[in-house]
Amino acid sequence: MPDDEIQTLNRPEAAPHQALPRPAATPAAAPQPQWLGPVLIVGIVLAALNLRPAITSLGALFEETRTGLGMSGTVAGLITSVPALCFAAVGVTAPRLSRRFGPAAVVCAGMAAIAAGLLIRPFASNAAGFLAASALSLAGIALTNVLLPVIVKRWFPDRVGTMTGLYSMALAAGTSLAAAATVPLTSALGGSWRTGLLVWAVLALAAVLPWLPIATAARRTRAAEAAAAGTAAGAPADTGPRVVRSRTAWALACYFGLQATGAYVTMGWLPQIFRDAGVSAATAGVLLAVTMVMGVPLAFVIPRLAGRMRNQGPIAVTLGLFGLAGYLGLYLAPAAGAWAWALLLGISNCAFPLVITMIGLRARSSAGVVRLSAFAQSTGYLISIPGPLLIGALYQHSGGWDLPLALMAGLLVPQVALGVLAGRDRTIEDECGMRN
């Protein structure tokens, strides 16, 4: 890898007017068409908008869907655990697919899978068909989850923080939009849960469109570089680091898992915590929306700030302290300070855009980013699976929220420590003994 690419993360981010991306420099890099920059930005934003509506739209209509399909409690519980399982199982295949077809082509296929699943599942006549269609969408989400940081690193190496902030903000907006708008849209379109779920396929189909020309342009670039290097375009050499040897990779994976645990617990249980404290159901839903909406502006600010810092540990500490304050408030006065606790937890949950930014900063090469992204996200989602189930079991066993809140506050301590380790100014290539 050329020295100018190795040093790219030590440069300040490019000025905002520089719209045209440049792939990581190689001697045989093909010239890029002028339209690619704006289309890539649109494609990244649309892809990010589609990474959560398949999940949060179902959450809004879950009771109606269960009734309509005659799901048993066991099947319903399986469906709620499928996202994390798919993200872990499918995400780990992303490096191999990216090497074979290129990250842009895989993201394009991922968008198509999301759209296909969202189109099919409202027409399912039984729980098995619904689960299969949902799994198709979730597989597309899993691949795109892993590869968007790679796209950013590949095409915007001098603007990792800014571009990560842009798609993190879009992801948060898509999450909040689907959660808030699904029920009103369902009512406006006749009241059928099938129509309410189907409407999100339109957004997914729109996301496929920009990725078709992006994938075509990327394939031509890969072919030109492979021809110049005398290698097969479809099977480039695997020169990425072995991330399991990297302490930073493990710190990132565990940090990802703990922040995902906190986010899933918040989305699943926060309204119930408020309702048990005497807050009305309607207000509890609004409080959850406030928590989720906090991620929209902060998801843009935090990655930009992180991208300008050599060490992101202080941000991890700050977010953890906000979370500790929020859980302490829920423990002491859940109803009296409900709005403040919702805001504090919303800020704490912005550990997600931070860890996504760190994935892009902790590897020098695109090969390193794709391996690190797949490892950190797949391992992290596996770590997050027991969390919401354990919180539910503690709540049922103890009959209150003291023990669950104490556990969540306790988990923030190792999360902060891992964030400090993951935020250190080093790369997985150095830790794995690779020299470029």
Image (spheres, rainbow, N blue to C red):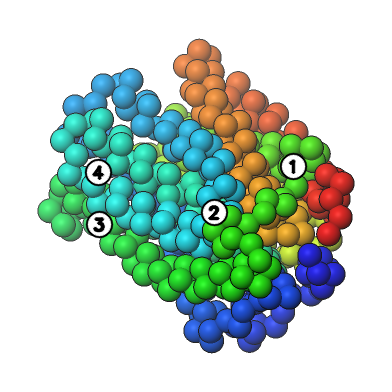
Residue type, numbered disc 3: Val
Q: CA distance from mark 4 to mark 3?
A: 12 Å
Q: Are marks 3 and 2 in contact (CB under 8 Å)?
A: no
The reply to whether residue 1 is visible in this rendering is yes
Instruction: Check residue 121 in the rendering and tell me which mark sits there, or answer none.
Output: 4
The reply to whether residue 155 is visible in this rendering is no
Which quadrant is the N terminus positioned in?
bottom right
Which residue corresponds to mark 1?
Answer: 242
Seen from the viewer's position, the closer of residues 302 and 283 is 302
Which mark is in front, 4 or 3? 4
Horizontal relation, residue 30 to residue 77: left or right: right
View extreme (left): residue? 190
Q: Position of residue 197 (x, y in %)?
A: 26, 49
Point out the tag, 3 or 2, that comes first from the N-terminus: 2
Residue type, numbered disc 2: Arg
Q: Position of residue 271 (x, y in %)?
A: 44, 38
Depicted 218 relative to depicted 119: above or below: below
Q: CA distance from mark 1 to mark 4?
A: 38 Å
View extreme (front): residue? 230
Q: Classify mark 3: helix, strand or loop.
A: loop
Which quadrant is the C terminus positioned in?
bottom right
